[in-house]
Amino acid sequence: SVTEWAKPFILKQPLGDLTGPVIGPESSGAVQITWASRCGRQLELHIEQNGRIEYLKVSENDDMVEGEILQSSNAEIDELMAWVNNT
């Protein structure tokens, strides 16, 4: 399930320069997780029941990039988290 995947994912993330995540359910059964960095970056993840993650990256100057990855794409997920954490 979405929550079974999301719980360990959230707990393993080092906060570093991030505020704690904002987590909420979506009407589709997905879970939205939003991370924000002190430098102004924001990452919004929509964890879907079909094994996909839709994401929205918002940079310091409000440029936006949307995309989709698989929950099993650990390297891509790590890249997204490194981006929002500015590392």
Image (cartoon, rainbow, N blue to C red):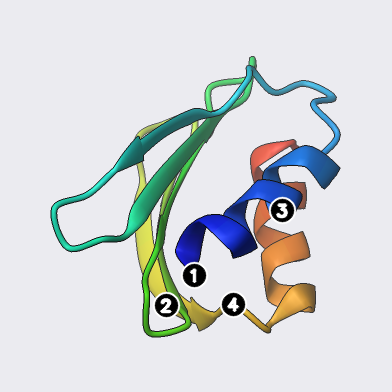
Find disc 2 in the rendering and name its residue.
68
**Is 22 located above or below residue 74 in the figure?**
above
Find disc 3 in the rendering and name its residue.
9
Label 3 vs label 1: CA separation? 13 Å
Q: Does residue 74 appear left or right of residue 4 in this picture?
A: right
Q: Amino acid at mark 4?
A: Gln
Q: Nearer the viewer, mark 2 or mark 4?
A: 4
Q: Amino acid at mark 2?
A: Glu
Q: Amino acid at mark 1?
A: Ser
Q: What's the mark number on residue 1?
A: 1
Tell me whether the residue at label 3 lies in contact with that at label 1, contact meaning CB atoms closer than 8 angstroms.
Answer: no
Identify the mark nearer the N-term, 4 or 3.
3
Q: Amino acid at mark 3?
A: Phe
Q: Residue at x 75, y 52 (%)?
A: 8
Q: Nearer the viewer, residue 55 or 11?
A: 11
Q: Secondary structure at mark 1?
A: loop
Q: Is residue 51 visible?
A: yes
Find disc 4 in the rendering and name its residue.
71
